[in-house]
Image (cartoon, rainbow, N blue to C red):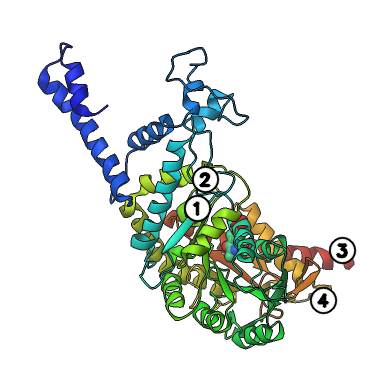
Amino acid sequence: MDSESLRESLSSLSLPKNHLTLGLTNLINQSKDLSTLLKHKKLPDHPFTDLQIQTIILTLSTLDTNNEFSLNNHNSTAAGRWVGVGEREGRIYSSLVSSRNFGLGHGMGRSGDIMEPQPKAVGSSILVQLTKHLVIDAMIRGAGLKAEKNGGPVNHGLILPICTGMSVALVLSSLREQDESESDVKKDVVLWSRIDQKSCFKAVLSAGFQCVVVPTKIEGDMVVTDMDAMKKNVEKYKGRVRAIISTTSCFAPRVPDSIDDIGRLCKEDGIAHIVNNAYGLQCQTTVKLLNRACVVGRVDAIICSTDKNFLVPVGGAIVTSPNEKMIATISKVYAGRASSAPILDLFITLLSMGLSGYKKLLEERRQLMIDFKSKFEEVAKKYGERPLVCPKNTISYGITLDTLSQPLEGEDPQSINAGKMTSSFGSMLFTRCVSGTRVVAKGGLKTMGGQDFVGFGSSTDYYLSSYLTAACAIGLTENEMNEFFKRLDKCFKDYFAKRKKALKKKIQDES
Ligand SMILES: *Cc1c(COP(=O)(O)O)cnc(C)c1O
């Protein structure tokens, strides 16, 4: 009901007119905000209040057919009441579940297309479309990605209620549908610039492709794209390569792939290029790299995690592309309907942040980065370690862990199990309530899908050192950061004390 008709209806009540006018101001402002949102489909500059967001969602929810049944209207037989006789009518048994979902029970999409509007659920459909526009706007005006006439990284997009890995798999599957040429050779190979994250590798296998791991190379401390190896593999599997997968957010010492060079190669050879940009939106350098890659080369799809970029619970991904057809095909390949819960979380979050809130988070991270780097270095040096110099990675940082397995005075070097000792440092940190660090000991081995990964964790076979990484990621607070370095320092101290004590005991026992 708009404020004017509300004012009219209320005029018969004995309320002072000026009170009514004052009270209605909020309502007027709120409906202004909502109509601006629906009209422009842009992230509001300033955050909406929780009350405002709830009102919007409940309004949208009212547009879905199921919300008549769930309001206990089962027995109403008025002609305008919905009667649901399908096997999926958005019926929600538990009122707790219903309120957790704001009564939205239809999910998203139709069986033929995940972005297609659902006639029974106009509200849910608006929610999905609107969230897509808001998140792309956040990526443009917040993070700095470009939408351009000749094809920017965010010209088109969709949101999926599945994580990064499965989204990569879905995008890969959609490439089968994109094939224009009816050649006899089956394109069964995906080239993957090595990144030691299991889900990326598994994504390729679950999409039914053969994954060819293209080795990286070491440049100083950095693990970088090996373009020569990439070209050699394109040549080796000529005609069979369905896509190249590159990655732009990764643990140090690996740095973002040279997606501009890979993009050029893909353009020349007519190969699809999928970019795994899991949490790269928070990094300006990566955003610039994405913009450039779309100008100079071929990029078919960019996949970003919703949780790692926008601080929502795990469960969603955003796929963007310079290419409209690509997005339409991905949308159609998804089998069936989908949950809209991750999209609702994103919608709420984006409105709670507003453009100003999102920019503030990005800026706070940029500020923290400076201290993060220097404090990490400080602790490292105190214990005879050094920082890994990887200027191309400004999210994940690393320090060497080589002193941990050096023999102490009087210790038999033969008794040292370096891998085990180094890993135990990671466990010690975890028991001191530090999560998210990674300890990678030299020479680890992992087998996945029948392939061996030597030096697993470092994205290269033989890295120079064992090391520890930690991320200065969006949402980290200064307090958390300072506490981390305090605990890391203490952990080093405890580690060496423990080893000295054990050695002393051993020597005593032996004598
Ligand atoms: C987090 C991450 C993934 C896996 O993401 P899921 O959302 O768990 O599928 C894949 N690749 C990279 C680089 C990541 O950071």
Specify the label residue 60 is tagged with.
none
Q: Which residue is mark 4?
A: 412
Q: Earlier in the sequence, mark 4 or mark 2?
A: 2
Task: Say whether residue 490 is visible.
Answer: no
Instruction: State whether residue 504 is above or below residue 389.
Output: above
Give the amino acid type for the residue marked by disc 4 in the picture. Asp
Q: Which residue is mark 1?
A: 159
* Marker disc for residue 509: 3
Query: In the rendered image, which residue does mark 2 sit on?
Result: 342
Distance Cα–Cα, label 3 vs label 2: 59 Å
Q: Is mark 4 within 8 Å of ligand 1?
A: no
Q: Position of residue 104 (x, y in %)?
A: 49, 33
Residue type indicated by callout 1: Ile
Where is residue 191? Give x, y as percent: 66, 75
From the image, state whether disc 1 or disc 2 is nearer to you.
Answer: 1
Relative horizontal placement of residue 100, taking residue 498 as reference (left or right):
left
